[in-house]
Amino acid sequence: MDATVIAINVVGWVGMASLIAAYALVTAGKVLGTSLLFQLMNLFGGLFLMLNSAYYGAWPSVGLNVVWVVVGTVGLVRARLLSTGRAQP
């Protein structure tokens, strides 16, 4: 197995762990779904899984994770706007 395949696999596993951990933290009440930590975990988890899925040609998973990244990005932008008082909750 070459270094690229190992890196892609590690990225995929880190992405999966990030998404599961984010969900577990919210479910356990340890973080809010609107928190920066939750949004970042979702954004990077989705991005990492998108890269892994694209490498392996798993296009439905790529599509799902593109949506996941967009949702995470929108959450971060919205949180930023709320923190500066430029948006309504």
Image: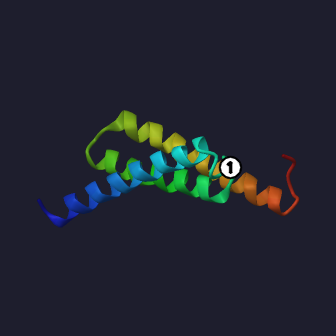
Q: Position of residue 17 (x, y in %)?
A: 41, 51
- Using the image, determine if residue 53 lies above or below residue 36: above
Residue 46 on image: x %, y %? 47, 48
Neighbour tally class for label 1: few under 14, some 14-19, many 20 plus, Cα within 10 Å: some
Extreme-bottom residue of the structure: 3
Left of 59 or right of it: where is 63? right
Question: Which residue, given by chain and number where applicable, does mark 1 sit on?
Answer: 32
Seen at 70% across and 49% down, the residue is: 34
Q: Which residue occupies the foreground of this view, 2 or 14?
A: 14
**Given the current orientation, which residue lies at the most extreme top position?**
60
How many numbered callouts? Answer: 1
Q: Is residue 15 left or right of residue 79?
A: left
Residue at x 46%, y 37% (from the top left corner) = 64
- The x, y position of residue 27, in whole percent, is 58, 41
- Give the structural element (helix, strand or loop) at label 1: loop
Where, quadrant-wise, is the N terminus in this rendering?
bottom left
Residue type at the position of mark 1? Leu
